[in-house]
Image: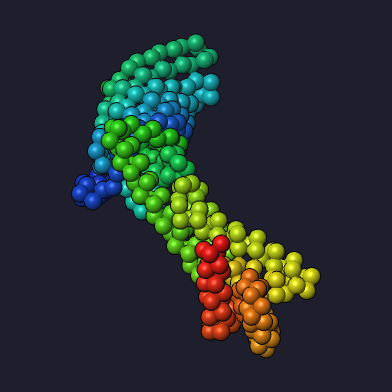
Amino acid sequence: MRPFIKTTCFIISIFVFKSSICILYSQVTFSRNVTIGTQAGYSIITGHYSDSLNNGIGAGFFSFVPFTGWAMLNGAFLYNRFSLAHSHNSSMQSFCIAITPALYYNLPYDFTTYTGAGLSLQYYTLSAIKTNAYDSTSKTGLMASAGIAKSIFDRTIVVIETTYHLSELSHKKFQTVAFSIKAGYQFALRQPEYYITKEEEKAKIREKQIEYHFTCGKEYMQKKDHIHALDCFNQVLSLKPDHKESLQYIASISKAVEQYKSAQALLQQNRELEALPLLASSSFYIAQAESIYKNMQIKYKPSISELQKKAIESFNNQNYDDCIATMNTVLLIDPDNAVASAYITRSKRIKETIHKLQ
């Protein structure tokens, strides 16, 4: 068993040395948090009593109380039970309160390693059932521990720890080495300024998310992918319900969707020219509407001359509203048509003049 003790002490020394070197580079995962939890494990007897007592089991409670970003206080209340080697009906129990100053260092992937040494107060009871013998005593001792912790859920950690106790019974060295698994929960005990800072950090993260979703929404809108654009703008509103630009874009896209649905209904009724204005408006946001609209422009381009002739007749007959409506249809087919633009302008001016003279 002595080689094992030497190995354990060597490992603890390495942890102490490593923690001392890494103090300047330590993170603050445990900083200003108190961890409370339970533990259970397996204990090995060493020293003078190793031939008299069998190995035992232990359980208890523990706490981590950090002071800085690299130092903490490791407290524990432990219970161990050992059977006498030659009697299954007799046992020794120990109740231990230990306070251990420790160094800790945060590793990548939410792992944290720690090591420390301190004082322990142990209360031993020995009972022999067959003879009804019972004795008890309290002893002080030393305790060293080293372990590694891993965060698994929000504020929840799992710890694997090795501890070494040294005390004496009847002027004989009594040593135990224990291997424990711990599970604990971290309670944040911080100043109000910390929470203000955290809220500010959350606000900055929220603003970045808003900017990201809004930018994605505009990119989708430029691609005329209205479904994904709406989804992005709604993501923005979930973070900031009064986001003005997103509300405007959602209103515009929703209106375009309704126009496209109306255009599809008119197309099913073979009222294609009536569907043109709706397709033109919805084509700014909906790729399918743009595709249909372009095909309609190609289809009706040969009809421009006939439509212009009809509009000019309406103009000559002083039916300016019909002229404007027909020329607008021409512009929907050919947006650069100069004749249509000119007749629309002239018709509007005449209508304004007539309105002033009335």
How far from the left and from the top, in percent, is residue 302?
67, 89
Q: Is residue 275 above or below residue 20?
A: below
In depth, the one of 261 and 246 nearer the eye is 261
The residue sitting at the front extreme is: 357
Q: Quadrant of residue 147?
A: top left
Q: Is residue 181 above or below residue 327?
A: above
- Is residue 19 visible in the rendered structure shown here? yes
In depth, the one of 171 and 10 nearer the eye is 10
How far from the left and from the top, in percent, is residue 315?
63, 78
- Is residue 17 visible in the rendered structure shown here? no
Q: Write the residue at 51% across / 59% down.
A: 249
Q: Write the residue at 46% across / 16% down.
A: 127
How far from the left and from the top, in percent, is residue 275?
69, 71
In depth, the one of 259 and 90 nearer the eye is 259
How far from the left and from the top, in percent, is residue 247?
50, 53
Q: Is residue 271 above or below residue 114?
A: below
For the N terminus, which image quadrant? top left
Which colour style is shown? rainbow
Q: How many marks?
A: 0
The residue sitting at the top extreme is: 132
Q: Write the residue at 43% across / 35% down.
A: 184
In depth, the one of 358 and 326 nearer the eye is 358
Q: Quadrant of residue 63?
A: top left
Q: Write the residue at 31% across / 22% down.
A: 121
The residue sitting at the right extreme is: 269
Horizontally, residue 180 falls left or right of residue 350, namely left
For the C terminus, which image quadrant? bottom right
Horizontally, residue 147 falls left or right of residue 337, namely left
